[in-house]
Image (cartoon, rainbow, N blue to C red):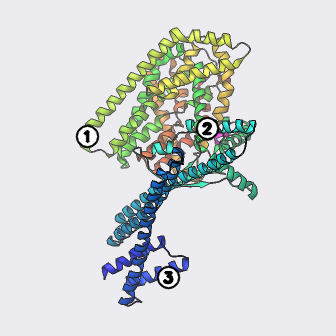
Amino acid sequence: MRATGFISLWTLVSLPCGQLANPAEHEDVVKHAIKLHRGKGAVITQRKQWVLESCRKLSGLLRQKNVVLNKLKNAIRAVEKDAGLSDEEKLFQVHTFEIFQKELNESENSVFQAIHGLQRALQGDYKDVVNMKESSRQRLEALREAAIKEEMEYVELLAAEKHQVEALKNMQHQNKSLSMLDEILEDVRRAADRLEEEIEEHAFDDNKSVRGVNFEAVLRVEEDEANSKRNASKREVEDDLGLSMLIDSQNNQYILTKPRDSTIPRADHHFIKDIVTIGMLSLPCGWLCTTIGLPTMFGYIICGVLLGPSGLNSIKSIVQVETLGEFGVFFTLFLVGLEFSPERLRKVWKISVQGPCYMTVLMIAFGLLWGHLLQIRPTQSVFISTCLSLSSTPLVSRFLAGSVRGDKEGDIDYSSVLLGMLVMQDVQLGLFIAVMPTLIQAGVSTHSSIFKEILRILILIGQILFSLAAVFLICLVIKTYLIGPYYRKLHAESKGNKEILILGITAFIFLMLTITELLDVSMELGCFLAGALISSQGHMVSEEIMSCIEPIRDFLAIIFFASIGLHVFPTFVIYELTVLLFLTLSVVIMKFVLAVLVLSLILPKTSQYIKWIVSAGLAQVSEFSFVLGSRARRAGIISREVYLLILSVTTLSLLLAPALWRAAIMKCVPRPERRSST
C-alpha cells in the first residue's frame, strides 16, 4: 500500500514532463493523486490501473528518448563522414546535435531529481524545520545549477543561430557578385568579429567554478517610462547594452560595471541623475544653513537626508555616490596637510601621539566598565568605545578653514595640536580596521585561545608600527630628494596652463594614498602627508596649490556630506529622541571631560588655556563610525539596533559640534583671532 502511494506521487511529478496537454488535465491528475494517496474516493483496482497507465506513459517517454538519442548518434557519424562539408561546418552541426542530446538528458535528470526530493520530503517530519530547511536549500541549489545550464544552452543556441545566419549570408554572397563597398564592409565585419573575440572576457565561465562563488537568483528590472512605445524601444536597446538593474533575493541592487562589449561607450544614467540632483538641492540647503548661522556642511547633510532612503528615496546609486564622496575626504585632508607645515608638526608631535592614545585607552576602560554593568559582551564594548573615541577630521578642518595664526612666543597653536591629534586618530583608525578580523574571531573563540588572540593582536600592532616607520622613511626620502625637483618641473610646465599643475598634484596625492594603503595604514594619512610634504616647499607654493585644489575639494566635499545624510534616519531619531539625546550628551560630555583631563597632563603650563578649544573640537564622533559600524554589523560584532544607535549618536554629535566649538572660541580666543577662527 505504501509503495503504491509512493509510485502514484512519483508519477505525479513525472507526468508534467510528458504528454499532459492542458491545465485542466493537470488539475484532474493532481486531485486524483491526492485521493489515491489518502486512500479515499477510489477502489484498489482503479488505483492499480491508474498507476500502471501512468508508469506506461513514463516508460514510453523514456524509450522514445533513447530512440531519439540513437538517431542523433547516427546523424553525428553521418556528418563526420560527409566529405562535402568543411571541418568548421562539421563541428557546427555536431555541436548542434550535442546541444539537443544535452537537453534530453537534462530533462530526464530533472524528473528523477524531483522524485528524489519528493521521497526525501515524504520520509521527513513536517515538524522538523531544520530538515525542511535543508531540503529547501538542496532544491534551491539544484534550481540554480539548472538555471546556469539552461543559460549556457541558450547562449549556445544563440551562437548556433548566428552561425546559421552567417552561413546563409555567405551562400548569398557566393551566388552574386559583390561591389567594392560590399567587400570592404565584409572585411570590416570579419575584423569586428575578431576584435570582439579578442577583448571579450569569459568572466562567467572563468569564475563559476571558483571556490566561494555562489549562484544567486536575480531580478532584472527595466527603467519605467511614461511612454510605452518609448519604453519598448528602450528595452530592446537595454537588452543589448545591459543597462538594466539587477536585484538579488537579499534586496541588494546591482548595476553594470564592465560590459561584455567594450567597443560601445556607456554611461550610468542613474549615477548622473543622482549627482545632478545632489548638486541642485545642495544650493538651497546650504544657503538656508548660512542664513541661520550654521555651517554649510549641515545643509549638505540635510540634502542627503531629503534625497536618501528616509526621504524621497530618489538616490539609486548610493554606493557610487559614497565612493565619489570619499574623494572629498582625500582632498580635504590634503589641504589640511598643506596648511599643517612640518615645523608645526615637529613642535606638537609628542602631544599628538600621546593625547589620542590616552583618550582611546580611557574610552575603552569606561566602555568595558559600562558593558560589565549592562551585561554587554567585551568584544562589543571594545568596538563601541573605540568607534566613539574617534573625531571628525573633515568637520574640524572646516572649523579651522581660513584661520591664519602665528604662534605666540612659548605658546602652542591650538590648531596644530588639534590637527595633530586628529591625524593620529586617523592612524588609529587604520590600526583598528586591521585588528577587526581578530576582534571578530575573539568574539567566538574559547577561553583556551585567549592568549593566542592577544598574541595575534600584538603582532598586528607591531606590523602597523613597522608600516608607520616605513611611511616615515619614505616621506623623508621624498622630502629630501624628490618633492622639490618634482614641483619645480610641474611649475615650469604649467605656465599659462593650470591643468598640468592640478594633474601633477592630484597624481602625487594618489601616489601617497597608494603607498599608505599598501603598507596597511589608512589612506587618509597618505593624503595628509602629501599636503604636509608640499607645504615644506614654502608658503607661496602652498598658496598657489591651494587656489587650484580648493574648488575641487569643495565640490567633492558636498558629495561626501550628502552621502552622510543618506544614512541619517529622522523617523528613528524621532521615535527614540529621549534615549538618543541622553546617549549623545553623555558621549559628548565624556569625550570633552576626558580630553580636558588628558590635555591638562600633557600640555605645557603656558599653553593650558587651549585645552578647552581642543577638547571642544574632539567632543564629537567621527563620520567614519558609519564605515566601522557597517563592517561590524556585517561581521556580527554588533546588532542592527546598536548599529542604528551608533549612526544616530554620531549624527547628533556632529550637529552639536558647531555650538560647542563656538562656545569654546568665545570663551578662550581673543577677539582679533576669533574672527578668523569662526
Looking at the image, the residue that sits furthest to the left is 448
Range covered by the magenta-colored residues = 298-302
Outermost residue on the front side: it is 83
Provide the residue designation for mark 2: 262
Q: Nearer the viewer, residue 43 or 284?
A: 43
Please check the rendered image and state whether residue 125 is part of the magenta-colored stretch, yes or no: no
Eyeballing the image, is 413 above or below 629?
A: above
Q: Which residue is at a point 37% across and 26% down the rendered structure image? A: 463
Q: Earlier in the sequence, mark 3 or mark 1?
A: 3
Badge 3 crowding class, 10 Å Cα cut-off, few under 14, some 14 to 19, many 20 or more, is few
The residue that appears at 46% across and 21% down in the rendered structure is 351
**Residue nearest the viewer, comparing 449 with 606:** 449
Q: Is residue 276 left or right of residue 664?
A: right
Q: x and y percent of residue 89 in the render?
A: 54, 47
Mark nearest the camera among 3 and 1 is 3
Give the quadrant of residue 273. Answer: top right
Q: Secondary structure at mark 3?
A: helix
Residue drawn 69% across the image and 27% down it: 551
Q: Earlier in the sequence, mark 3 or mark 2?
A: 3
Residue beneath label 1, please? 449
Question: Which amino acid type corresponds to the residue marked 2 in the rendered image?
Answer: Ser
Residue at image position (62%, 31%) is 662
- Residue 542 appears in the picture as rendered: yes
- Label 2: element kind: loop
- How many numbered dots are placed on residues in this image? 3
Residue 656 can be seen, yes or no: no
Contact? badges 2 and 1 (CB < 8 Å)? no
Spot occupied by residue 57 in the image (x, y as percentages of width and height):
43, 76
Task: Give the label on residue 28, or none.
Answer: 3
Q: Amino acid at mark 1?
A: Ser
Between disc 2 and disc 1, the foreground one is 2
